[in-house]
Amino acid sequence: MKVLQFYRTYFPETQGGLEEAIRQICHSTSRLGVEQRILTMARVPEVEKLELPEATVIRVPIQAEPAACSMGTAMFKVYREQAKWADVIQVHHPWPFADLVHLLSGVNKPLVLTYHSDIVRQKTLERLYAPLRNLFYRKVSRFVATSPNYVKSSPVLQGLKRGPDVIPLGLSEDTYPRATEQAIQIVRERYGQDFFLFVGVLRYYKGLHNLVKASAMNGLPVVIAGDGPERERLKTMAKELGATNIQFAGYVSDDIKQALFQCSRAITFPSSERSEAFGITLLEGQLNGKPLISCEIGTGTCYVNLHGKTGIVVPPNNPAALANAMSELYSQPEQAAAMGLAAKQRMEALFSGEEVGQAYVELYRQLLNV
């Protein structure tokens, strides 16, 4: 069985949750006999192939990125070529250019669409895009949502004639090796122990301005690992508020990232917009047995993090509530540990790579009648 994953970006070009979600799908399904390829775009001079452990990655040159929508004319030819190889094509949304490529390429293969997020910020562009999306959706064989929460709150998913399957994102534990002792020592020397950790790309919808304000209120140690367009604004805000308890780690290696998870008290994930559809970082926190702090934004974050069981859920854009949740987990280590244990158990029951891989393989088989 051959499956082509199709999305606008992938490792090593970019580092993010959706890239990790695709990597995990490839890992978990390949163990069940699926051969995976990933077709994506990158800042490369010509089409190239990379052999990664999870899949062969075909990278097509980017020529334009209006509103973060990667485009390139070479993709039409390459898509047709890769579609001939594939038994099933799996598109990850939103990416309007993918709709256009598929519609104009004349490809007729079983098509799975994994719906990660509504288009939230570009409302005007979303209305212009809707007719193209509707044409493309007629070609889709099966839709997949990543949480029942997002199905309930998404106007697009609610408008489908046939409701989507729900297959959450998942992680295979053996793709996240324990941190080395050297990495743990480095983290302890630089950042200490029992800090509140955020890991991710520093984007507007991550709500990190609220974390900075909350940290200024409670004075608790915070490490923000990652890079992105909000970095300088957040650093300036922290300086203006006197939040010297916040350390910006920047982009970190996988080994250091795992050490950060292992040394932290809890994971803070203050995303405040529906652009945050799930939160791979929450799963990574669960994998490491850490309690979670997240916001109720009507998406999969509250499917992963159950308030009062695996962590604490607070209202979005409420720094005081976020500060109080952090103080609660810091002052009550036994409660934090119990929530961390429950988080690990929930991850193993619902979000393991094995469960997710089996669900996708069954879907592929249904489409191919095998």
Image: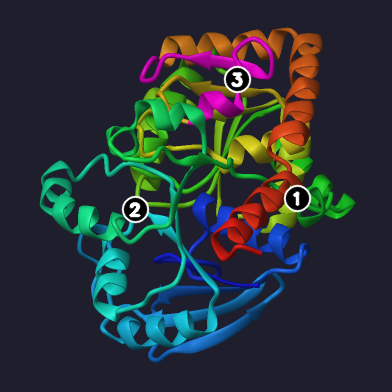
At x 55%, y 74%, the residue is: 87
**Residue labelled with disc 3:** 220
Which quadrant of the figure has residue 50? bottom right
Which quadrant of the figure has residue 150? top left
At x 44%, y 10%, the residue is: 320
Is 6 a magenta residue?
no
Amino acid type for the residue under numbered disc 1: Ser
The boundaries of the magenta stretch are 300-318
- The crowding category of the residue bearing disc 2, from other C-alpha atoms within 10 Å (few below 14, some 14 to 19, many at least 20), is some
**Residue labelled with disc 2:** 94
At x 63%, y 60%, the residue is: 365
**Residue labelled with disc 1:** 172
Q: How far across and how far down the image is residue 300, in percent?
A: 50, 31
Position of 188 relative to 85 (above/below): above
Task: Kindly indicate whether the residue at mark 1 contacts the one at mark 3 (C-beta within 8 angstroms).
Answer: no
Looking at the rendered structure, the secondary structure element under dot 3 is: loop
Visible in this render: residue 60? yes
Visible in this render: residue 63? no
